[in-house]
Image (tube, coloured by chain):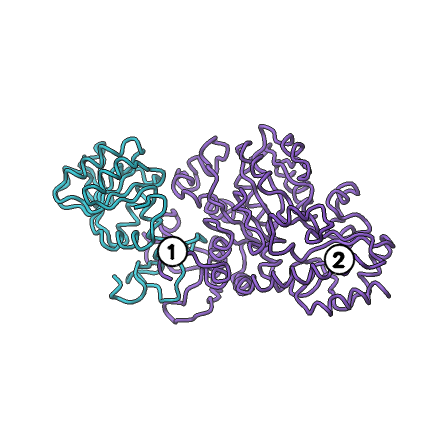
Amino acid sequence: MNHDSYPDSYIRGILNTAKTVAMVGFSTNTSRPSYFVFKYLLERGFRVIPVNPGHAGKEALGQKIYASLADIPEPVDMVDIFRASEHVMPVVEQALALDPKPQVIWMQLTVRNDEAAALAEAAGIKVVMNRCPKIEYGRLSSEISWMGINSRTLSSRRAQNFGTGFQRMGLGEGKKSEN
Amino acid sequence: MADAERTPGFDTLAIHAGAKPDPTTGARATPIYQTASYVFDDVEHAASLFGLQAFGNIYTRIGNPTCAVLEERVAALEGGTAALAVASGHAAQVLVMHTLMQPGDEFVASTKLYGGSINQFNHSFKNFGWNVIWADPDDLAAFEKAVTPKTKAIFIESIANPGGVITDIEAIGKIARKAGVPLIVDNTLATPYLCKPIDYGADIVVHSLTKFLGGHGNSIGGIIVDGGSFNWSRDKKYPMLCEPRPEYSGIVLHETFGNFAFAIACRVLGLRDLGPALSPFNAFLISTGIETLPLRMQRHCDNALAVAEWLSKRPEVAWVSYPGLASSKYNTLAKKYVPKGSGALMTVGLKGGYEAGVKLVSNVKLFSHVANIGDTKSLIIHPASTTHKQLSDEQKTKAGAGPDVVRLSIGIEDKADIIADLEEGLRA
């Protein structure tokens, strides 16, 4: 995988398939980017499990916060990492020790660790680096277009409404089979 | 075309970028969302939108779906990450500077600019404490010397108004990079069809949408395009982008929004507080105009070259300033930056001086005597007594708008008719 540029089909596939996301480096501070992503993904039907040893045992938006990936009592599809690049390797190693292993390791904006990525990919795990799932979902659903942001998508097919609520879009393209 | 593996061409983007059929009605043309506000699902949804935690429309002063189509289209055409459409080109410049500058800061600006920008910088911006330092873009050493520790931005035009000048964007981009400040390029006269300043190091691009992008002289508008390339957090020079914002409970815009943070800052800080919103109807007309941008711009350029060549052979004409002419000192820069053509604008000096200029403006019948450029119609004006009137004589000359100068904005009429009208006007 070329980690400088991801095909939209790769990202769309990941966001359509991952149901449970463990968010490592989650912050209870509601102004931090991790909180924004947490809230957004919850509203779009993802199960999001916050991980932060400093806040273990507390709750955020009804979700229990765990101290580490190992403490999570259910399988996790995707690990979303909000930590600096130099702290990524131990997180990936912990993810690889999970049973079952997650299908995706996702690193947030400015987070990039090619060594950790290679380790995960060798174990058959998909990796995304220097991206934000909120921004990618926004881009591929075209929600982000409302903010004047270049979604870099182009389609004459009907966009898919999420199903509930104004201004909430899905990732498919109108045909129910695409999801 | 669901995946972005294959990048669509310019002509395709001009028609399709930002647009989708309406999912409820199937309407193919962009609906004109002539609405002030938008219904929320519930209190939670409203709070998310106000807190920037969800993408969506809240109030047309801050964002509107018709304007959003225009924004995405221009961002895609310029190769930017995002754009913000506003009430006018002037408003775009105010919002850009409002996001970058604090009172007491400086910015370096090219002397070769549209007269309206020169006035804005010398007067209103000065009132805000944003101090312009003028520099000649043809003298790169002097341009670099104009940068001081207080400099926060550099501003140039790609093709400069009133006509005939091309700025060396790449060279000035290097100066900006060295100074650690963003390069702002007003790309109004070229449009991304002729030149994409982001490819040459521009960090921010602005347009008067009123001109060639809208193309039909019917709607005032402006736009800011985020190049997505500048590191707003590196030197902590730009508090609106790299410091926790009190207006949004302490979020750091650059951290939260990454490479489109500048456009978001202009919208949620500047546009929200200062208010120069673009009418959705104007946005509709302008984005419709953009669909034919490639065709129109090429015709503008082909017609302008023919007119410039014809004029240079006329006995009444002392000089013609048009970069497409081999005789122009900017011809080499033109071949580099605007290889498809040198745009629609030219300035002409008549041998009869000021009086001859006034006579020409009065005698043409096809050309419209207006304060505008970039219409399908051919336009004519005498800049010294109008668009550049409030400048000093020295500034006028530096800007290429001396007393004998006539400015032409060549339209897309039949070339023979344009030339015949000028011939009538010169002879009368």
- Residue furthest front in the image: B326
Amino acid at pointer 2? Ile
Instruction: Give the residue drawn at x 26%, y 63%.
Output: A178
Amino acid at pointer 1? Ala
Disc count in the image?
A: 2
Tell me where residue B127 sits by quadrant.
Answer: top right
For label 2, the SS is strand
- In the rendering, at what x and y percent does residue B344 appear? 67, 58
- In the rendering, at what x and y percent does residue B428 appear? 86, 66
For label 1, the SS is loop
Tell me where residue B88 sits by quadrant.
Answer: bottom right
Q: Which of B190 and B148 lies nearest the eye of the viewer? A: B190
Q: Is residue B233 above or below residue A178?
A: above
Q: Taking B166 as reference, is A87 left or right?
A: left
Q: Is residue A78 above or below residue A141?
A: above
The answer for which chain carries disc 2 is B
Q: Which of A50 and A176 lies nearest the eye of the viewer? A: A176
Read off the residue under disc 2: B381
Q: Taking A73 as reference, is B147 left or right?
A: right
Q: Colour of chain A?
A: cyan
Read off the residue under disc 1: B4
Q: Colour of chain B?
A: purple
Q: Distance from label 2 to label 1 (Cα)?
A: 45 Å
- In the rendering, at what x and y percent does residue B362 appear? 81, 63
Sort mark 1 into few (<14), some (14-19) or many (20+) by Cα contacts within 10 Å: some
Q: Nearer the viewer, mark 2 or mark 1?
A: 1
The answer for which chain carries disc 1 is B
- In the rendering, at what x and y percent does residue A135 appear? 35, 49
Tell me where residue B130 sits by quadrant.
Answer: top right
